[in-house]
Image: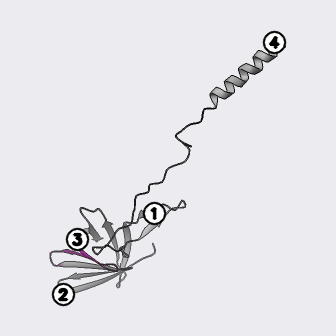
Amino acid sequence: MKKAFILSTGILILSLSSCKKSEEGNKGIIKSDSANTEIFADNGAIDSTIAYNTDINGKKSIKTDYVYKATDGTLVKVVFNYDLKNRNVSITNNKKTFVLEKSEAKVNETIYKKDDMEATVKGDSLIIHQGNNIIELVKTKI
């Protein structure tokens, strides 16, 4: 009887000491980043020209690279850099890349410029003005 009492008391003490409640919470759960990922236009409204990817957990991330198609069927790679200090767009076609700096952003339109080249982004379209040439591009579903 003494052995059973000592044994059950030992098991009880051992089980109580091993079940400490952690103050840090469940370590198996990944904490979400509560930082605001939305980019704002120059007037402070949310810039509608920027697209976001949303994963299955609802976390938003900014989509930066797209394939656009010209009216003649040519495919063009366009990469947007949304860094607050250096916001620009890189347009690549035929192994040539043009980098244009953001000059102006409205709610539905963003304008990038460099020298005589200007690119205007409106929704799914990108219109490039270079000298007297106007090149119209439309975002593809690729």
Q: Quadrant of the N terminus?
A: top right
Residue to which mark 4 is pinned = 2
Q: Amino acid at mark 3?
A: Leu
Task: Say if mark 1 contacts mark 2, CB within 8 Å.
Answer: no
Instruction: Decide: few, some or many residues near mark 1? Use Cα within 10 Å; few <14, some 14-19, many ≥20.
Output: some
Whole-number angstrom distance, CA of label 1 to CA of label 4 = 63 Å
Relative height, residue 118 to residue 16 (above, below):
below
* Numbered range of the magenta stretch: 103-116
- Tell me if 68 is positioned left or right of 9 in this view: left
Q: Amino acid at mark 4?
A: Lys
- Of labels 3 and 2, earlier in sequence is 3
- Of labels 4 and 2, earlier in sequence is 4
Q: Residue at x 68, y 27 (%)?
A: 15
Disc sitting over residue 3 in the figure:
none
Disc 3 secondary structure class = strand
Q: Which one is closest to the eye, mark 1 or mark 3?
A: 1
Q: Is residue 107 magenta?
A: yes
